Image (tube, helix red, strand yellow):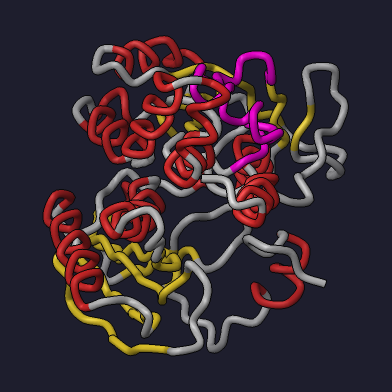
Amino acid sequence: MYRDGKLDPVALKAQFIEKTGFRRQEVLQGPSIGVDVSVIKIDEKTALIAASDPLSILPSLSMEISAWLSVHLMANDVATTGFLPNYGQFVLNLPTSLSSSQIQNYWNSIDQYCKEIGVHITGGHTAFDSFTQSTIAGGGTLFAIAPVDEVKTSSLAQAGDDLLMTKSAALSSSSLLAWSFPDYIKKHVGDEIRNQAQASFFETSIIPEVKVLQEDQALFSQVHAMHDVTEKGIIGASHEFAQASNTCISLFEENIRVAEPQRQVCKLFKIDPLRSIGAGSLLIACNPHYTDKIITKLGDVHIEATHIGRFNSRPDLKSYLQDQNGLPIPYPVEDPYWAAYFTAYKNNLS
């Protein structure tokens, strides 16, 4: 029986990752647990980076929010390489229940967000489906061209690296709940927390921190790998990061930042913020001698970064993630956001 959300790593590897068609030697990075992108060598100096994600349609919120999710969740994956996307393909499978104005608003917003980050939309496919009931309305792929020897992937984290996170845990789950059930949140935790949680939705892009790090190439060279947080939160993403790099992370859970709006919204909906959708938080593997400089560099532009762990070698081959006492931290079975959202929806919260 499958659960809502992303397929778990064991099933993903067993059913899909080992079956990737004809193998080509120019594919430097193909599908792998915890790796956000594919990397293809074009020539001796150049690589093509690609990342795909579902497109979101959430008419009950707004078409602008839907478009933001559609563009920026893909862009986040590409940005973990240290480069921003250049081109995009969008495959739309839209519900027939949408009005012409909704569709126009959605695509105008996609167009605008792509312009803002430098993406040229090069094509795709457009269709309508009267049976579409979900919030997924197709898929997209973003591409970047980059020097082949400068591309970072999450597989490049090294034993001895420090693990940093940016911003807060549960940014996207708390903000989506705040937009979906604003009256309920206002009633229980107040106007200010609701407004702050809603505003944090537009912090769910990691492009700002990647741009800041790009400004100092000497410092950025001490960042060995990056991974963006998505479903199953900081805990799930840390597992993926360790698995991608075949390391074991010692996680300092008490250091994981949960900003006050996120803490209060997650508490209200009985969600563990460390294990809930956290797009907008970037995990960074870096040379420990440069940890403080990276934190300061980001802090100078008001992006909070926190030291939350250390990458270690994995001699026992048993655990990818441990607490500071060496006890295994299991991979989350499911993301609590989905149950919280659907329970609130069925209870007609607003």
Q: Is residue 327 left or right of residue 163?
A: right
Number of numbered tags placed on the structure image:
0
> Depth check: 158 or 258 in front?
258
What is the x, y in percent for residue 37?
A: 44, 59
263 lies above or below 39: above
What is the x, y in percent for residue 160?
A: 61, 24
140 lies above or below 197: below
Query: Residue shown at 53%/47% (left/top)?
Result: 230
Q: Quadrant of residue 323?
A: top right
Is-magenta flag for residue 258? Answer: yes
Query: Residue shown at 40%/19% (left/top)?
Result: 192
What is the x, y in percent for residue 286?
A: 47, 26
Q: Is residue 50 visible?
A: yes
Q: Quadrant of residue 212?
A: top left
The residues colored magenta run: 252-276
Q: Is residue 30 left or right of residue 138?
A: right
Query: Residue shown at 41%/76% (left/top)?
Result: 138
Query: Residue shown at 77%/37% (left/top)?
Result: 314
